[in-house]
Amino acid sequence: MAETILELTDVQAHYGRIQALKGITLNLEKGEIVSIIGANGAGKSTTLMTICGIIKASAGTVRYKGQVINDMSPDKLPGLGLCQVPEGRRIFPRLTVEENLDMGAFHRKDKAEIKRDVEMVFDLFPILRQRRHQAGGSMSGGEQQMLAMARALMTRPEVLLLDEPSLGLAPIIVAHLFEIIKDINKEKGVSILLVEQNANIALNTANRGYVLETGHVVMQDEAQTLLNNPDIRKAYLGE
Amino acid sequence: MTHVFKTIWFKFAFAMVWLYFLLWPLMDLNSDGTITFDKSFAVWIRIVVVVAVLLTLYRLKKRGTFEPVANGVHRVTAPLRSRLGLVPGWVWLLLIFAFMLALPQFTERRVHDVVISVLIYVCLGMGLNIVIGLCGLLDLGYIAFYGVGAYTYALCALYFGLPFWLCLPLAGIFAAIAGCIIGYPTLRMRGDYLAIVTLGFGEIVRIILNNWMSLTNGPNGVSAKPMTVWAPVFEGGFHIEAIPLRNLADLYYVIFFLAILIIIGVHRLNFSRVGRAWEAIREDETAAELMGVNTYMFKLMAYAMGAMFGGIAGAFFAARMGFVAPESFSFMESALVLSIVVLGGMASIPGIIMGAVAIIALPEVFREFSEYRMLAFGGAMTIMMLVRPAGLIPAKRMGERGEEKE
């Protein structure tokens, strides 16, 4: 069995008095893609925000490479190789594409390597090379999603947390993005934790999947098994 | 076409009626209880005529009546303009620098006075620009740091006899410390809450200065010694002596070089790693944190840096006025500096310089209309925000599009 790189044990989180996560236990093995699917308000994004420490877990532990990162300041994580592409992309709209990428390399000092990585993400997303001097906010939704992913790759992650990369994008662009996600996983060996509403494409991309409902993990299995499960098909695939 | 034409004139008439209802209570409700109409009407009818003429010209321009004339002018000036475009930027900067250097030689006292105030506000604007323009933190109590700087110099000179040039960095450091003290609790807030809390802290500083009688002499203020320079003196044998600078032209040079130092400092910060982090925080704080920016530390740093420049400007202000009192550091001043930054263009250094000129120097020029100065000021600000919402000279980086560059 492969080595576990990210592990959540009975993690709980609150927004004020409202409990959003009621004990999430999940793990991510090195080199795999894991999807978390679920309806609105199930706690998918909260799970990712809690892993990154933007929301502090009120109970339970988050381990990254065996180290408990619950109380770690969120800005330390990119240096450790854990990076999130947040929901709604959240690029820096008035900075140019290049400056956005520079922000991804904020914690790094190795200038020559950074330059090479910029070229690497431009090869991965050629459209960004054309738009390198353009303000991030002036691009289309799909391009912004690519920029957000490129920016995260600039941190040289070992684990990438992707929050709804398909949000508000045309199906053809979504398909293209998920091809690239597979590439990133396969060629760069980045482990990916993927949160999606689009259960179909998420489970088709992933090795394993977790189903979240109102702050609980209600099901977990191989992605293909979940895809064939009649309950899942009914609830999340609209059959 | 005629339909559009009609609605425009209808809107014009409506706006003018509204303006009259605004002007009338301002000008014709007299303090002795009488009500008149003539004074406001006299002003109003002038505004109506001017606006009507402008509107007609605008309509004609839209229809293209002036195009032949404009084309002719363009054909004449185009080669001139392309030749001017060849002159590199540093030549213009050098020309402006030379002009500013020579300015006191051919102008009178009144001009020195105005230019010195403009330069003080340039320094303040630069400091606030770091906080608001770069880091995106709305700070309504910024003037408190100006006050801390001013009182640092006045009190250090009074109690310890320290010279101005030693107090200047001290004022910057004290203001930065004050910035950290105020920033430490407040910077946990975001947006509107931060604005309200900074407003409160700004007032707290002013009220402390006002009430700490034993230290600051309260509302009566403290006199500040004039600044001195070391210069060789030949009378009674050659020796070096501290001579007080009282001449406005000399003070002008001091603030001119201070302003240049601050501008260079802000420019370098702007394009450094730190400046980039500040801008990322302004754009999206959570995303910046996810990218590894310690947002709290960088916000505190922006606050302290901005405060430091404000404190330096304050020390100069104290030395130049020879007197400081808490009333100089009221909320109105904070609002003035804020409007300089917003009017000039957030995060844009030339914009802020223009903003300071527009907001400090223009009212001086129009002193004759002193009564309606604020009215005209409000009107000008409104029009500016409609015509150029990003400021007089918007920052290059904001919203620039790739196609325009290529």
Image: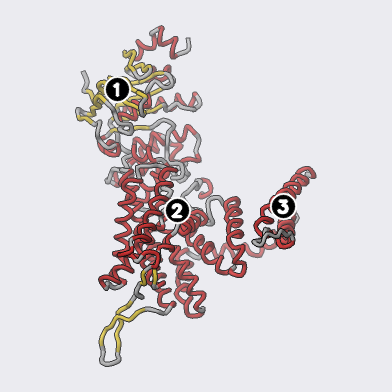
Foreground pick, A34 / B80: A34
Quarter assignment of residue A13: top left
Mark 3–mark 2 distance (CA, rounded to whole Å) = 36 Å
- The chain to which mark 3 is attached is B
Question: CA gap, disc 1 to disc 2?
Answer: 44 Å
Residue B403 is situated, as x and y percent measured from the top left of the image, at 52, 46
Which mark lies nearer to you, 1 or 3? 3
Query: Which residue is label 1 attached to?
Result: A32
Question: Which residue shows up at 47% across the image and 63% down it?
Answer: B89
Instruction: Check whether the beta carbons of the residues at disc 1 and disc 2 lie within 8 A of each other.
Output: no
Determine the image quadrant of residue B43.
bottom right
Q: In the rendered view, tell whether residue B211 sits above or below residue B107.
A: above
Q: SS class of the residue under badge 1?
A: loop
Observer able to see residue B11: yes
Looking at the rendered structure, the kind of residue marked 2 is Ala
Q: How is the image coloured?
A: secondary structure
Which residue position is annotated with label 3? B16
What residue is shown at x 34% (from left), y 56% (from top)? B305
Residue B269 screen position, x and y as percent: 36, 55
Q: Which residue is mark 2?
A: B347
N-terminal-most mark, 3 or 2: 3
Secondary element type, mark 2:
loop
**Chain under numbered label 1:** A
Q: Chain of mark 2?
A: B
Circle 3 SS class: helix
